[in-house]
Amino acid sequence: MSRTHGPSPARRTRLLSATTGLVVLGGAIWTNPALAQQLDVVTVEGAVEIVVVDEPPGTGVADPDDPAGLTTTAMVDVDGALLDLPDTMEADLRSGDRVELTLRGPQARGDEAVLDAGRRDGTTSIVSVDVSTTTLGTEPGASPVGSAAGATALTVEPGAPGAAPAAVPLAQVTAAGGRLVVLPVYWTASAPSEPTQQGLGSVAQKAADYWRAQSAGQIDMVVQTQPWKKIAAPSSCASVGAIYNAALLEHGFVPAPGDHVAIHFPQDRSCGWAGQATLGGGRIWINGINAVDVLAHEIGHNFLLGHADVMRCTESGQPSVLTTTCLLHEYHDSADVMGYAMLRDPGTLNVGFAHALGLVEPVRPAPGAVLEVDVAPVQAGSGTRGVEVPGADGRRWYLEYRPRVAPDTRTPESWAGVQLREIAVDDRYGASAPVVRSALVLGRPLEDGAGLRIGQPLTIPRSGWTVTVLSVSSATARVRLEPSPPPGPVTIPVVSFVDVPPGSQFHREITWLASSGITTGYADGGFRPSAPVSRGAMAAFLYRRSGEVYTPWAVQQFTDVTVQHPFFREISWLRAHRITNGNSDGSFGVAEPVSRGAMAAFLFRTLGDATYRPGAQKFSDVPVSHPFYREISWLEASGITTGYTDGTFRPGAPVARQAMAAFFYRMSSMPQ
């Protein structure tokens, strides 16, 4: 399932029902009281691993309307046994988290036997039902933590050194002489005739050669390919942990530090994925596709590389270059190995990714100075391979020259030339170390092409730099970077609304809200102070207050918020920052009014201190057991609200727009 992972700064407890007889065998949940009596229940510790699930290959430059998104899953390593976690137990887990699991396994054989059964035949399982926890986006009336009777606790600690296979530094791979080991398995009547062991080895060697070439020999993997081995049939290809355990057992293989182990099995089209890989680890699964770019892509995930995306922008509804209205399209950078697989030799790793791995050192402009530089082709092994331009919010922009020569012939001619990519940490993965993603800017959007046009200056947003491609030859591209003209003086307008006359209640707060650019009011000149605030408008207010320029992925995340929705970016930002996960039915409730309790939760998740612990009850209608007791208490302790004169807070009442203006005004002195 698609998941956005947040940080885990504090101890968490997830409640799992201990209903007798409810077990998971091979990934399927079912009930058998008789079997339950024959199972031991043991408690063990393990470490979470996050796995990226990659889509099947594309056939060319990705369709802009393709709704591809990021999919990850989680599993737990318990003494070398990989246990697949049901979807209901995956939310908020991050790679490296230490977890305590309650397992059911064969009776009277001891803890080691229970784990061994999990390795061999999947009869060890994690009890998983009635997950009950205060989740992001919970509305008043939801069950608080601890409400499920007769439950077993799964306790999660923040990631710690050694908690899970850590990201393998390239220096360690080189020093260890790391291996790329292919373990083919099948569960049909007979072993497949294709691909042969030799064919698998040939593709693996090409993938190893690719990374050796990209790293100028720093990544040097020795390839080993084993013969086909038969394993017990898994319940589905979603049970990748069980498949991995069985493959290692049947092959008698013990991975060493620095190894990349690829489990290859005959293609099952019902799986819906081509490959999977652990982030920062060494585990890989290949669903029957024996292709260099598929395997090389998964190895990239082992190196903590995210996906190579495309940034598509519009101006007044028309395709444009780098405007404030942009969307990210997952995988769509077909030129890069971390984009869509196309069953062809992968293109050169982009300079931003190569720099993140320490393989390339780009040049940088000196502050306030003009830089003119000849950039060598990305395929070259020497010369200036790229230019790094610092941006805002920790992002970096990279210029590179990518002519349409081997191995970069996967894309049309309009993609060739000087390309601009944004590199940023992508926190959606939930890895134990930063995962970087890239976003290719379409320099020729009307042609759906990537090469920047010669002689046309392009200002990189929020970087202070303007880039111009001066000339291009087969050997180099000459690029000029110069400081962007400083912005003109900012005039803060004095805004008034026809229904908020001077002297009216909240006139100061509403005027401030408009002058700060947080609201524009309505087209008729009114503010409608007594009207309730919708959840969509709340998202817009919070986003505008942040001052962030957020570029969302072009993937619909809620059933009632399409990519074309006027608040799509704002609501996507809300979810990306883990301020909400929406409603349990998959909707955001964009037109629904925001209750005062939910409003407190939104504000706390935006500005609150994660270490805050409430004291005594402040409001008569917000007892300690209330799901938003902590958030409402913080609101009062921060001076944002005093409640009503009768001592109530009225958490279920809708928030009026004028009250929201007052809340935001009182927050104006707080840090962003």
Image (cartoon, rainbow, N blue to C red):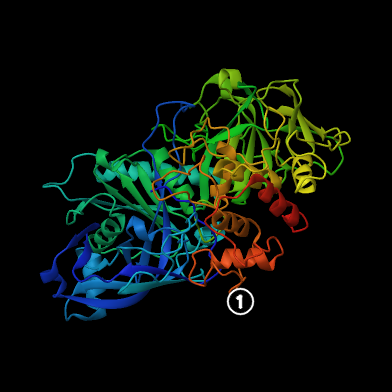
Image quadrant in which you'd find residue 417? top right
- In the picture, measured across the screen, residue 191 lies left or right of residue 478, that is left
Look at the numbered disc 1 and give the secondary structure of its residue.
loop
Q: Residue at x 25, y 40 (%)?
A: 270
From where the camera sits, is residue 385 visible? no
Query: Up-down: is 487 above or below 76?
Result: above
Q: Position of residue 61 (x, y in %)?
A: 47, 26
Amino acid type, mark 1 = Gly
Residue most extreme to the front: 646
Q: State the residue in front, 432 or 304.
A: 432
- In the picture, measured across the screen, residue 375 lies left or right of residue 151, that is right
Q: Residue at x 83, y 35 (%)?
A: 493
Q: Position of residue 333 (x, y in %)?
A: 52, 33
Q: Residue at x 54, y 66 (%)?
A: 621
Image quadrant in which you'd find residue 272? top left
Query: Up-down: is 21 above or below 593?
Result: below
- In the picture, measured across the screen, residue 236 lies left or right of residue 292, that is left
- Residue at mark 1: 615
Q: Position of residue 197 (x, y in %)?
A: 26, 46
Q: Total of numbered circles in the picture?
A: 1
Q: Position of residue 641 (x, y in %)?
A: 68, 61
Callout 1 environment at 10 Å: few (<14), some (14 to 19), or many (20+)?
few
Q: State the residue in front, 370 or 527.
A: 527
- In the picture, measured across the screen, residue 22 lies left or right of residue 173, that is left
Query: Up-down: is 108 above or below 531?
Result: below
Query: For the C terminus, which image quadrant?
Result: bottom right
Image quadrant in which you'd find residue 244? bottom left
Residue most extreme to the top: 447
